[in-house]
Image: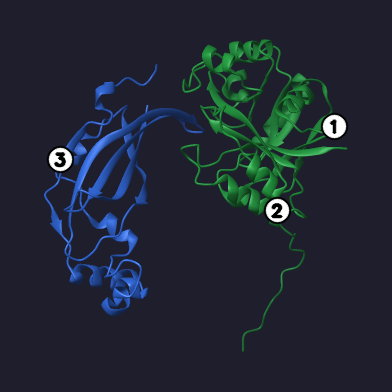
Amino acid sequence: MAVNYDPALIGRVFETTDPVPVTAEMIAKFTEAIGETNPLHTDPEAARRGPYGSLTAPPSFAVTFRNGQHFFQHVPRFGKQGFDAGKDVEFVAPIHPGDSITLSSHVKEIYEKTGRTGSMVFVIVRSTLKNQNGEVVAHVDHRFMNRT
Amino acid sequence: MSTILDLHSHSEASEDSRAPLEAYLNWLKLRRAERPVDGIVLTEHRQFNGSADYRALEDRFGIMVLKASEVETDYGHVLVFGVTDEMTRRFDFANVRLPAQEVIDEVARMGGIAVPCHPGRPNVGLCEHYTRKPALENVIAVEVLNGGSRKGEDERSEELVRTHGYGAIGGSDSHLVSLIGLCATRFDADIRTIDDLVRELKTGAYEPVDFRPRRKPVHHAVAVEVK
């Protein structure tokens, strides 16, 4: 049995979050939590002289933004059970204090594969993070595995 | 002159690998004494990129890069060497239930060779399918050494080869940079192209080779007195 789904699902944005304002305090808390010491992310003066002209969040800050509250209702499911099979994050542009970040999510890909433990269907949901200027700052690909 | 090739590897073009080709080649260059492979074959899952050109990287690192594919069939996973446009038109490589016998016969008719890989692996290997279905015809070789095998899987593959008289190849099945070249195949002949490889797999002399480090045995327990 081939994996069956509506091809129109692919690429259609199903949810966009409200903008989340980014503050210097949020970045400071994040850098402290992960032990970040790079002055581009911790020292406004040093960052001002750096390549981005002001303080920026560490790249992994991108994964702190929550998906919309209906996100999981829109993740296609196959078979009887599944689990979160990981995330790929592509950092596109730095996030600065003062930015407002929105997430838009769509199903990027659905594919089937076989392995030691049987057949699986993978669903990739991409959340694209944009700032207040509509510039993409990151893509987060959520990988969900379903047992078939 | 002989040639040693890792016949089974996945770069970041496969959805479950994060290994850039450049990093594979750099790793092999740095570890030539431990893993003396002359080249690798990229066998990306369920796809074939006919237009990819790796000559610049080959020249830079002095390591050959050939292209093949790993497809999924009703008898498990199969490496297809010598992929042509005719093959990709004939078979949907993304289909995880390709008919294995048709793949073997049609690939051979179109000038390539299909080699079942990791046959000792549960669910996706020949051995398990042979317990329920008739043996495939026209199989020339199978992969008996696989760098991703778990305990007992390569041994089942060896038994399969003994029973059916198949030829035997080896490949790392690497999805991570550090695993490239751990298992490979030594050919008696000089291989420079995918056509050379297909010809030698069909009619030449070759054997799997294992470069995996062996753990040193512990001969004596040592008691340490703590004061």
Report the side of A78 relative to B112 (left or right): left
Q: Are marks 1 and 2 on the same chain?
A: yes
Q: Nearer the viewer, mark 2 or mark 3?
A: 2
Name the residue that disc number 1 marks. B189
Looking at the image, residue A101 lies above or below residue B86: below
Residue B27 image offset from top left, x and y in percent: 65, 53
Q: Earlier in the sequence, mark 1 or mark 2?
A: 2
Name the residue that disc number 3 marks. A70
Residue B184 image offset from top left, x and y in percent: 72, 40
Residue B46 image offset from top left, x and y in percent: 51, 27
Chain A visual colour: blue
Residue A71 lies in what quarter of the image?
Answer: top left
> SS of the residue at dot 3?
loop
Q: Residues within 10 Å of mark 3 (few under 14, many from 20)?
A: few
Quadrant that contains the C terminus of chain B: bottom right
Chain B visual colour: green
Residue B133 lies in what quarter of the image?
Answer: top right
Disc 2 marks a residue whose amino acid type is Lys
Looking at the image, residue B217 lies above or below residue B131: below
Chain under disc 2: B
The residue located at (84%, 28%) in the rendering is B205
B122 or A50, nearer to the observer: A50
Q: CA distance from mark 2 to mark 3?
A: 49 Å
B135 or B174, nearer to the observer: B174
Chain under disc 1: B
Quadrant that contains the N terminus of chain B: top right
Name the residue that disc number 2 marks. B29
> SS of the residue at dot 2?
helix
Going by the picture, which residue comes out furthest to the bottom?
B227
